[in-house]
Image: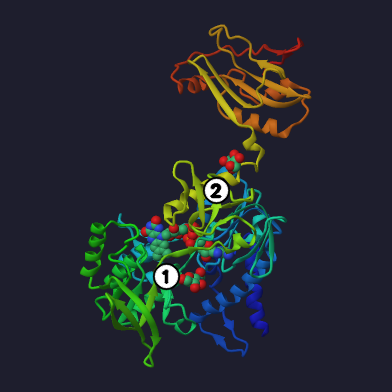
Amino acid sequence: MSLRNRFIIGGIVGLMGVGGYNFTNDKERYHTYRIPLIAYADNGEEIKKSSIRSFIDEQTATLKKKYIINQLPEHVPYVLIGGGTASYYAALTIRAYDPDSKVLMISAENEAPYNRPPLSKELWLHGTENVYKTLEYIGVTGKKRDIRYESDGFYLSPGALNQFEHGGVSLIRNTRVTEIDPTNKEVTLDNGKKVKYDKLLIATGGKPKIPYPFYSPHLRNKVMTYHNVSDFQKLYRIASESSSILIYGNSAAASELAFSVQSKFGKNKLKIIHVFPEQYPMQETLPPNVGEFVRNAIAEKGVIIESRAKPISVDKLVNGKVEVVLEKDGEKSKVIVDHIVIAAGNEASTKLAENAGINVDSTIGAIIANSKLQTSHSDIYAAGDVVAYENPVIGRQHSQHWENAQITGRLAGQNMTGNVKDFHHHSSYSSLFGHSLHLFGVGQTDSSLKTVSVFAPPNKEEPELVRGVVFYLKQNKVVGILLCNVFGVGIEIGRKVISDAHEIKDFVELAKLFDIYLPQNDELAEDVSADGEEEKENRNEDAANAIAESKSTQKTVPSI
Ligand SMILES: Cc1cc2nc3c(=O)[nH]c(=O)nc-3n(C[C@H](O)[C@H](O)[C@H](O)COP(=O)(O)OP(=O)(O)OC[C@H]3O[C@@H](n4cnc5c(N)ncnc54)[C@H](O)[C@@H]3O)c2cc1C
Ligand SMILES: *[C@@H]1O[C@H](CO)[C@@H](O)[C@H](O)[C@H]1NC(C)=O
Ligand SMILES: CC(=O)N[C@H]1CO[C@H](CO)[C@@H](O)[C@@H]1O
C-alpha cells in the first residue's frame, strides 16, 4: 500500500473518530469529506473523481467491518436476532418502555430494516425513476416513500452503544447469529464474535421454500426465490433483459409478482407464465370466487396462467434457457423460459432455536411461545413469522403476515423490558374525589408501614384544601409516596426517591422536592382549572408548615 493510500485511509479513520463512531451515517459524512480529495492507487496513478467514491466505499467497508467487529460490546442488555419487521418494532418498543436501553440488532441482510410487502407491489407499480437503487415509490398520497423504516443515521454503531448514556439501537448487518447459548446467555456470530445478553429476541422470519424439482445446484443461476431487497434488484435486472419468466407457486406474493412484473416490463417483450398446481390463485386463503377475480386481474395484464399444473422436471438448455416439463390433467407439456422465480411460501427459520434446545412445534414448523411471546427459555422471546404463540381465544397461532410481525414484535419488546428497570417496579395509581382531593400513589403505599407526613398549613380561603406528601418507610428508607393535591412531575420524583433508597434523616428537606407549598401566583389556578376548577385568587403564602410524624414528633418547617 502506498503512502498516499495510507493517508486516505488515515483520513477516514480520523473522521470516524470524530462523529461518535456513527459509521452507519457515512453517506452524509462523504459530503463533507469529498471536497479536496485526490486519491492515488498503489501504482501511483490518480483515481478519477467518479471512482473515488467507490474507492472510499471499498476502503471504508473493510475498515468498517474490522472496526465494528472490534467495537462489539461484550454484553448488550437487549439482543435481537433478525433485521425484519418484528425485530424493528421490538426495538422501538423496548426503547419506549426502557428509555436508556441499549439494543443490538443482528441482521443477515445488507439493508437496514424495511417494509417487505412493497417488494412484490409498489416498487414495480409505482417505483420512482431509479427505484432499482433508491427503493422509493410514490405512495397513495402522491408522496415519495422509501421502504426503509429509518434512515441509516438512526442506528448507532455497536461501539457507540456503550458510549451513549441514553443508549440507542445498534444494527450489525451482513452478519448471522450461528448459535444461542441459553446457559451463558450468549450468542455467537458468523465472524466468531460472541455477545452476552440479558434478554434475547429471535425474529429470524422465514426462508423461501424451494419445491421439487427446482432445487438443484446446477439450476442455481436460473432459479431464484423472492424474499428481500437483493432479490428485488436481481429480478428487476432479469425482467428488464428477459423475454420469458416462469413464476412458480401459489402464494399471494406469487400472484402479486406475476401481476406487477408483467405490468412493469410487459411493454418490453417480457411474458410471464404463472404456474401452480392448485385450481385457482391463492387457493389456500381465498374462496373460489375471489380466486377467480385474482385470476382475471392477472390475465388482463397479459400473464399466462397455468393452474392445475405440476412441474415434473427442469433442465438447463445449451442456449442458456430452461425447459420445464409440466403435467396438467394427465398430459405433459414443455415450457421454455429465460428464468424461474419460486414464490411458494416460506418455512420459518427455527434451526437456531432448535439447536439451543428451545421448544419448537415441528408440525407447524415454528418456535412455541406463550401469550407473552416468551419461549420455553424465560429470557428468550420470539416474534414475527418464526413464532407460534398462544392466543387465549383461538389457541396456538402462527401467522406469516406483516401486521402479526409488527404486533408480536411490539408485545415481545414490551415484555422484554418487564423487569429491567426499577422504574417499572414502582407502579403508580391515582384516586380522585371530586375536585377537592386528588391522590397519587407510587411504590408501596401500605398503611401498616411507618409514615411521615409533610403538609402545607391550612389556607384561610380554602380550609378544606389539603396539600402535602406522605412518605411510607422501611428502616427510614422511603418505599412508597402518596401525593395529595400535588400535580406535575411529583410521581416521577417519587419514583426516583424510592429507587435511590437513601436513608432519610430530614423529611422536611425531602418534602421540598415536591410542590407542596402554595404558589405565588396563578400557577395552582392553572393546575386546578385544568381539572375544571376556576381558582384565580391569590393565596396565603405564609408557609407556617406543619409536619406530623405518625409517632407524634412535631416540627416546624421554615418559610420559603
Ligand atoms: C414479497 C413479499 C410480499 C409480502 N407481502 C405481504 C403483504 O402484502 N401483506 C402481509 O401481511 N405480509 C406480506 N408479506 C409477509 C411479511 O413481509 C412478513 O410476514 C414479515 O416480513 C415478517 O417479518 P419478520 O420480522 O418476522 O421476518 P422477516 O421480515 O423475514 O425478517 C427476518 C430477518 O431475520 C434475518 N435473519 C434470519 N436468520 C438470521 C440469523 N441467523 N442471524 C441474523 N439474522 C437472521 C433475515 O435476514 C431477516 O432480515 C410479504 C412477504 C414477501 C417476501
Ligand atoms: C435474500 O434472499 C435470498 C433468498 O431468497 C438469499 O439467498 C440471499 O442471501 C438474501 N440476501 C440477503 C442480503 O439477505
Ligand atoms: C411487562 C410484561 O408484560 N411482563 C410479562 C412478561 O411475561 C411474563 C411471563 O408471562 C410475565 O410474568 C410478565 O409479567
Assign a secondary structure to mark 1.
loop
- Per the image, the residue denoted by label 1 is 226
Quick one: which residue is furthest to the bottom in this view? 318
Quadrant housing residue 318: bottom left
Q: Amino acid at mark 2?
A: Leu
- The CA distance from mark 1 to mark 2 is 28 Å
- Circle count: 2
Check mark 1 vs ligand 1: CB closer than 8 Å? yes or no.
yes
Image quadrant in which the N terminus is located: bottom right
Assign a secondary structure to mark 2.
loop
- The residue located at (38%, 78%) in the rendering is 340
The residue lying toward the viewer, choosing from 518 and 477, is 477
Measured along the vertical axis of the image, is residue 54 above or below residue 299?
below
Q: Is residue 74 visible?
A: yes
Q: Is residue 146 visible?
A: no
The residue lying toward the viewer, choosing from 308 and 557, is 308
- Per the image, the residue denoted by label 2 is 373
Measured along the vertical axis of the image, is residue 385 above or below residue 223?
above
Quick one: which residue is furthest to the front in this view? 330
x, y percentage for residue 195? 68, 60
x, y percentage for residue 508? 72, 20
Measured along the vertical axis of the image, is residue 283 above or below residue 446?
below
x, y percentage for residue 424? 62, 37
Q: Residues within 10 Å of mark 1 (few under 14, many from 20)?
A: many
The residue lying toward the viewer, choosing from 280 and 426, is 280
Q: Could you tell which of marks 1 and 2 lies nearer the N-terminus? A: 1
Q: Amino acid at mark 1?
A: Tyr
Position of 87 with respect to 78 (left or right) is left
- The residue located at (53%, 44%) in the rendering is 371
